[in-house]
DNA sequence: CGAGACATTGAATTGCCTCAAGATTAGTGG
DNA sequence: CCACTAATCTTGAGGCAATTCAATGTCTCG
């Protein structure tokens, strides 16, 4: 359960300090709640320890392998889930079998379309993924009783909307090279580890296949591959084993992303 | 102030009945509040008459011509606005001068990025537009005190997110013909008047220039023009005066949109 | 009527896709 | 440990849809 990215941990720390705990102590929580980091991540940071305790009684942790389906398009929504680790892929399937990825979710995002009867998207694990599931009715009841939780969910959906619109610019106006650079940049920001040098060098392991990348970027996997090769020749990225990526200078990648 | 679309009026009626008024009567409202339909539209439908009264004291109505800027990218957010009529264009400007439209807003949507210090998008009137502006601090205070209002804003942002992701499929995977058909479909749904025949015939006036359409669809205006010509030859659409559009059979347009 | 904005059409170019073959990596069982 | 297979990735050649550049056509409004 510890492939939470550094970015997620940072976000988590912020949130924790912004929402101090009340009087109930962590040791009062049931066992399942101390077992994991759910307490400090995602929506849970908006809950008082008492509320969290209630939440933990209904929550169930699961692990998933890359490619595994977590929810089906038009399937009934029965639960929501906090992403505790790994990367989740949200996509729409087209009638001709092609796929468009419309978003990625990282820890500690909440997964699942709130208040909907059926899921509008296909949801799959892109990497190894950890989830903390909670029944639809339980979470919705908590949203009704906690203004802080509702506020947090409003904040996340506004941020997701910003991200989606940002990506529309990539899909609508950028060429293949800029698209690939944009995706590397997005992943580097969320999953990257900086070595603290100047210029800024960042490393990460790609959680997506070339095919996933292509489906997110609206181009073919061959084009993705060709562009990565070119970016490599220009020393914008260094790649070993197809998956292990180093960005020698983030500023140059940003410039490439347009 | 009555270029509110039929769709908007329908939405409005639903909302009104879902949230019945309390004891205070409409005649108790200050003058500015009875002057217009703000009472029955958008976020206002989530307010009690008492709250609405307070809202109306701070609200100001404005009218805008097509192309007029309503907010600038990175500009400070000082107020929010309910769209009372017409169509508002949300877009991002690129360094090379190109533009990507990332969303359209119709009455009775709320305009403005909630809780942000600066506006992440450029906002322009696409058609003649009516707004009902309210200071940032006033609306935010009301959100803090009204769970119903917060819920409504959460619902709108979730719907906007669904729409944005839907459009990402258009930008990422559809060809020019399907894109143009998708846009005509979107506008027909929001602004179209059906004549009640079978098969379903719908008419509307295009609120966008070819250039706006191109910027929303991620293609050039020449390509938009060519595709409209082809759709016309196939009798998917009929166009007079470049702007007055009739869809003789919605089902065929839907099929075209992919 | 004339000017300016908006829209259509044509011809040449290009960036990405399609189809096809080979290379690299990871996983499996002898 | 190595051979074998399946999955993933890379590279190449040819075709095509959309772009670019340029010219013409059509509305609107003073």
Image (spheres, coloured by chain):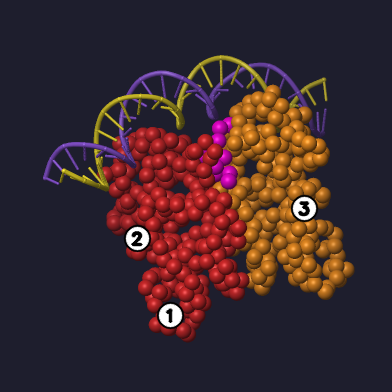
Chain colours: A red, B orange, C yellow, D purple
Tell me if residue B214 comes above or below residue A122 in the rendering. Answer: above
Residue at numbered disc 2 = A3
The structure residue drawn at horizontal position 68% and vertical position 57%, both measured from the top left corner, is B110
Whether residue B39 is visible: yes
* Pick the front one: B226 or B133: B226
Q: Which residue does the numbered mark 1 point to in the structure image? A: A29
Check the image and report above or below for B35 versus A31.
Answer: above
From the image, tell me which residue sits under label 3. B10
Q: Position of residue B146 (x, y in %)?
A: 68, 71
- Any magenta on residue B167? yes
| Span colored in magenta | B166-176
Disc 3 + disc 2, Cβ < 8 Å: no
Q: Position of residue A217 (x, y in %)?
A: 46, 41
The chain letter under disc 2 is: A
Q: Is residue A155 left or right of residue A198?
A: right
Mark 3 burial class by Cα count in 10 Å: few <14, some 14-19, many 20+: few
Q: Residue at x 74, y 29 (%)?
A: B238
Tell me if residue B253 comes above or below residue A20 in the rendering.
Answer: above
Residue B76 seen from this side: no
> Which chain is mark 1 on?
A
Quarter of the view holding residue B55: bottom right
Numbered disc in front, either 1 or 2: 1
Residue depth check, mark 1 versus mark 3: number of the one nearer the observer: 1
Q: Earlier in the sequence, mark 1 or mark 2?
A: 2
Residues B147 and B102: in front is B147
Magenta stretch secondary structure, dominant: helix
């Amino acid at each position: 359960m510890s492939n939470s990215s550094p970015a997620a941990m940072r976000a988590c720390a912020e949130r924790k300090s912004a929402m101090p705990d009340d009087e109930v102590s962590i040791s009062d929580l049931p066992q399942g709640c101390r077992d994991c980091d759910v307490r400090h991540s995602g929506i849970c940071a908006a809950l008082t320890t008492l509320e969290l305790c209630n939440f933990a009684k209904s929550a169930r942790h699961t692990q998933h392998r890359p490619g595994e389906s977590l929810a089906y398009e038009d399937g009934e929504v029965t639960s929501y889930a906090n992403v505790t680790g790994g990367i989740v892929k949200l996509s729409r399937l087209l009638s001709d079998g092609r796929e468009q990825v419309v978003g990625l979710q990282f820890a500690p995002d909440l997964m699942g379309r709130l208040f909907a009867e059926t899921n509008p998207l296909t949801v799959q694990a892109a990497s190894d993924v950890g989830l903390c599931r909670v029944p639809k009715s339980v979470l919705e009841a908590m949203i009704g009783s906690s203004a802080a939780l509702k506020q947090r969910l409003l904040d996340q959906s506004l941020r997701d909307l910003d991200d989606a619109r940002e990506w529309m610019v990539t899909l609508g106006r950028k060429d293949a090279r800029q698209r690939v650079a944009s995706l590397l940049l997005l992943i580097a920001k969320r999953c990257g580890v900086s070595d603290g040098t100047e210029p800024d060098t960042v490393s990460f392991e790609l959680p997506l296949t070339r095919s996933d990348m292509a489906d997110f970027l609206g181009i073919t996997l061959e084009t993705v591959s060709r562009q990565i090769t070119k970016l490599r020749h220009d020393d914008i990225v260094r790649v070993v084993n197809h998956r292990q990526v180093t960005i020698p200078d983030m500023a140059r990648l940003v410039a490439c992303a347009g």
